[in-house]
Amino acid sequence: MDRQANGKLITHVTITEENAGKQHAIEVPIVADGREGTEVYVRPARSGEDADGVWIADGETVVFRTEISHIYLKDETQPVRVVLEGREGSKVFVRRLNASEVDGGETVKFIPGKEEIVFTQSIEAIGLHFTPDVGRTDDMLASFRLVPDGREGSSVYGRALRHGEADTGQSVQLRPGDKVVLRPGALEMSLEAIDEFYEGIYAACRNYEVDLIGGDTVSSQKGFVISITAIGELTPGSYVKRSTAQKGDLVCCSGDLGAAYLGLLFLEREKKIFLENPEIQPDLEGEDYVIGRLLKPEARKDIIDFFQESNLIPTAMMDISDGLSSDLLHICDQSGLGCRLYEEKIPIAEATRNAAFKFELDPTACALSGGEDYELLFTIPQADYEKLVLNEQISAIGYLVEAEEGRKIITKGGALHDIIAQGWNAFK
């Protein structure tokens, strides 16, 4: 094709700028920026870039397209670095470059006079206010790190950053007229459930005279997870360790054991039935005790009060969360001792025995390995035994021996067996 006969070379375009109410014509050197049909896009030449001109054939139209990398915003003293967020009709949406993003130097292109630059609003977190208790004047705030999860028209979907998920710094971008919609799976709990959850926390705090001083809430792919940090003060020398038990000490526990595990079995059974047939209602009649021990464990502050009133100081102590067998072995390991545990002395409630029989389980096995009882397991000198009879909530279930004698359970038939830790292990 003969260029000279079928087109022309354009090296500059004239644009009009307004300054102080006056218009000024400016010659801008240009370079090619793409073609679409008969339209030839050009843009201003960048600093140091050769502007040799653009050949425009007969019948083609020049479309001047400029580019920006920064814009000035109200109340901002410095220009804001922006990148393309999206396009819709004649609107070109830009967003602020996130602090965690690598600046690749990209620019936002638009056609002056035909297209409009619109700055989007970033939302990085969302807070949910609610009142934890009826009649309270304060409120709670559950704050979620919000990340984008799609767009449909003017509905911008977001979800909470999941526990353990890397935060890439992305934020939800709102265009004028948009609304934020939380994905149904973004929150593991409804607001009503969150209300009830915090009501339970406040009830426990009041019961145990504990102050709630903060919290952080995120969604999880693994169900509802609660992590609590308790902070308090101890008088030096007044606390009891696991490692200070002595040979000959009695092994004691509070309350009764095994109920929480049976409560879990009932709930898991009914859940399985419900998932298979949602029309079948749960059948938990008569199982209030074991289910209550699972769903509402109580810290045995009454036992601690009894120790103080009776001037009884355990030589070693811990709570039973992993199961009696596992936790007794913890005390033996850290104190460098063995033990003898009497099966017939292990406290098991009648409701727990009946529940175990329904699952064709040995109640003793449930007490030894079930866990989640949150009763106190402790040791005391044999000389303090008489003090224990004053409290029906405490049972002496064994005694400690030299490590070489092993850790054994004496069955109801008099047989001697090794105690095996079959309770919960957090590292498996």
Image (cartoon, grey):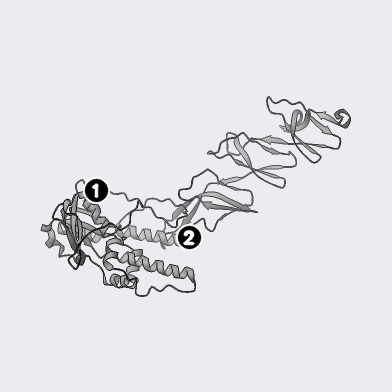
* Residue 305 visible in the picture: yes
Residue count near mark 1 (Cα–Cα under 10 Å), binned few <14, some 14–19, many ≥20: few
Amino acid tagged 1: Leu
Q: Secondary structure at mark 1?
A: loop
Give the image location of residue 23, x and y in percent: 76, 32
Residue at 22% x, 53% y is 331
Lateral position of residue 388 relative to residue 62, left or right: left
Residue 22 is at least partly visible in this image: no
Q: Residue furthest left?
A: 383
Tell me the SS state at disc 2.
Answer: helix
The answer to whether 314 is drawn above or below residue 121 in the figure is below
The N terminus: image quadrant: top right
Q: Is residue 289 left or right of residue 281?
A: left
Q: Earlier in the sequence, mark 1 or mark 2?
A: 2
Image x and y of residue 43, in percent: 73, 33
What residue is pinned by disc 2?
A: 191
Q: Quadrant of residue 347?
A: bottom left
Residue 52 sits in which quadrant?
top right
Q: Which sits in the foreground, 356 or 308?
A: 356
Looking at numbered disc 2 in the image, what kind of residue is underneath it?
Answer: Leu
Q: Please name whichever residue, 136 or 400, is drawn nearer the observer in this view of the structure.
A: 400
Query: How many residues crowd around disc 2 within 10 Å: few (fewer than 14), some, or many (20 or more)?
Result: some
Tell me the distance, in whole angstroms, between the alpha carbons under discs 1 and 2: 37 Å
Depicted 405 relative to depicted 74: above or below: below
Q: Which residue is mark 1?
A: 234
Image coords of residue 169 (percent x, y): 53, 43
168 vs 69, nearest the viewer: 168
- Taking the view exactly as shown, the residue that stands out farthest to the right is 5
Position in image of residue 165 (x %, y %)? 48, 47
